[in-house]
Image: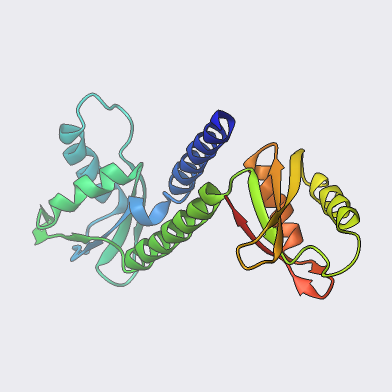
Amino acid sequence: PARRKETLEERAAMVVRQQQQAVASTSGRPERELYVGNLAEQVTQETLKELFELSLKSVFQGDARDKVVGVRLHGEKPYGFVEFLDADLATAALSMSGVHLCGRPLTIGRPAYYQEHVEKLAAEAKANAATAARVIECTPYLHLTNVLPAKGDENAALDALGKSCRQHGEVLDACVLEGGDGGRCVLVQFGDSESAARAWAALSTCDFDGQHAVGRFL
């Protein structure tokens, strides 16, 4: 039905927006910071900041913002870390590796913890994709088995099931179907896929006459 297709498309669009927001929220220091090694003793925070500011200004012409937001030098060893305003600036600054400062060629690269950060983002992206796939699979139509008693009042059981489903959203219809194996199942049509997903999350933990419910979305 047209209503079902529209609901799924809207749901898919929402998942995409959530994924984009998640990526934006994880764009932190590991992507904006670089390691700078082989520093001469006389190099100061101001010297290093000025070097990157001048070099990046020629690359990002028209951008009047400060490119470097922080410089941290190790007190005893010849290296430090430079934090840039955004990830694009940090990536551009990688090309400056080998540039001489105070007579020494600089070694510029990603910090040691950057790879760990990348792997974490990849794991999160994989988890988000799996979640998105599960959400998109949800529809307003929930097919249930093992929810009707082998003996007893079928209508009463169906009414009770409908009441439970309505606690999680609008229920448009519910009916009993004969399964291919001779068993009986219930098809419940909800007002939207979100209601169906909430109802199944609750029903999947319930016990029906000694049986665990089995559900799928159609």
Up-down relation of residue 148 to residue 135 (above or below): below
Return the x and y of residue 65 as percentages of the image width and height. Answer: 33, 30
196 horizontally vs 97: left or right = right
* Furthest residue in direction front, as rendered: 182
Identified at 20% across, 39% down, the residue is 56
Return the x and y of residue 15 as percentages of the image width and height. Answer: 51, 43
Q: Quadrant of residue 76?
A: bottom left
Identified at 46% across, 59% down, the residue is 124
Q: Quadrant of residue 64?
A: top left
* Furthest residue in direction top, as rendered: 62
Identified at 19% across, 27% down, the residue is 61
Which quadrant holds the N terminus? top right
* Furthest residue in direction bottom, as rendered: 210
78 horizontally vs 157: left or right = left
Up-down relation of residue 4 to residue 116 (above or below): above
Identified at 65% across, 44% down, the residue is 194
22 horizontally vs 106: left or right = right
Q: Nearer the viewer, residue 13 or 149?
A: 149
Q: Nearer the viewer, residue 194 or 3?
A: 3
Return the x and y of residue 213 as percentages of the image width and height. Answer: 72, 66
Return the x and y of residue 91 as percentages of the image width and height. Answer: 23, 48
